[in-house]
Amino acid sequence: MKLLLASGNAKKLAELQRITAPLGVEVVQPSDIGGLPDVIEDGATFAANAAKKATEGARHSGLWTLADDSGLEVDALDGAPGVYSARYAGTHGDDAANNAKLLTELAGVPDGDRGASFVCALALARPETGEIVHEVLGRTHGTILREPVGTGGFGYDPLFRFSEPGFPVTGLVFATLSAEEKGSVSHRGRALRELQPALASVFQH
């Protein structure tokens, strides 16, 4: 059985491979099947974009397809950058520019008002038809720092301090965590764990 991850992100692939390993599922990327057509991510929500990517990937590939859309929502910015997280500063995937813009936007915001959430929407689509059979949303809460800390992770990780109480990594910055530590509390890790029963149901039947 094969599951297509509609993303070329190696770190997302590794996370998905970890949770699907017990199911005996082979996870493949677009490059493994000759690529996928570009999808215009014009949805107003993370869930809408994830569903669109999953549907189009399943129709094109004929495989069960999982897609995600994720980003950062900052309370003081009314939820921005939101679905524009990856291209906040204009160029898709320019992490340094995105982080610099975020710090500029929050320059006058006091420490007590710098709350934020990472959000990850996952959508699982049926082969051929592209029907969405399962959707989940993972969220993790933290605060935005005034300068980057750490060299790990990607995106806004150097600015995001995890703030939920009761975890071993509470108070630590995402960019300072190992992949396993981050995955234990991250938005994507939580979404993937919530999706795991649905994946088991699909691939065991």
Image (cartoon, rainbow, N blue to C red):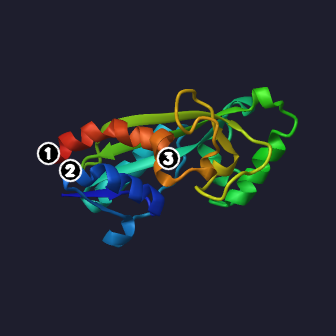
Mark 3 residue type: Glu
Tell me the element at label 2: helix
Residue annotated with mark 2: 23
Specify which label sits upstream in the sequence, 2 or 3: 2
Residue at image mark 1 = 204
- Determine the CA span between mark 1 and mark 2: 8 Å
Kindly tell me whether residue 38 is visible in this rendering: no
Q: Which amino acid does label 2 sit on?
A: Leu
Mark 2 touching mark 3, by CB under 8 A?
no
Identify which residue is drawn at 34% across, 53% down.
18
Label 1: how many Cα within 10 Å (few below 14, some 14–19, many 20+): few
Residue type, mark 1 in image: Gln
The structure residue drawn at horizontal position 52% and vertical position 42%, both measured from the top left corner, is 43
- Asked if labels 2 and 1 touch by Cβ distance under 8 angstroms, the answer is yes
Return the x and y of residue 65 as percentages of the image width and height: 31, 52
Residue 61 placed where, x, y %?
29, 61
Q: Residue 181 carries which label?
A: 3
N-term-proximal mark, 1 vs 2: 2
Q: Where is residue 54 in the image (x, y as percent from the top left)?
A: 37, 50
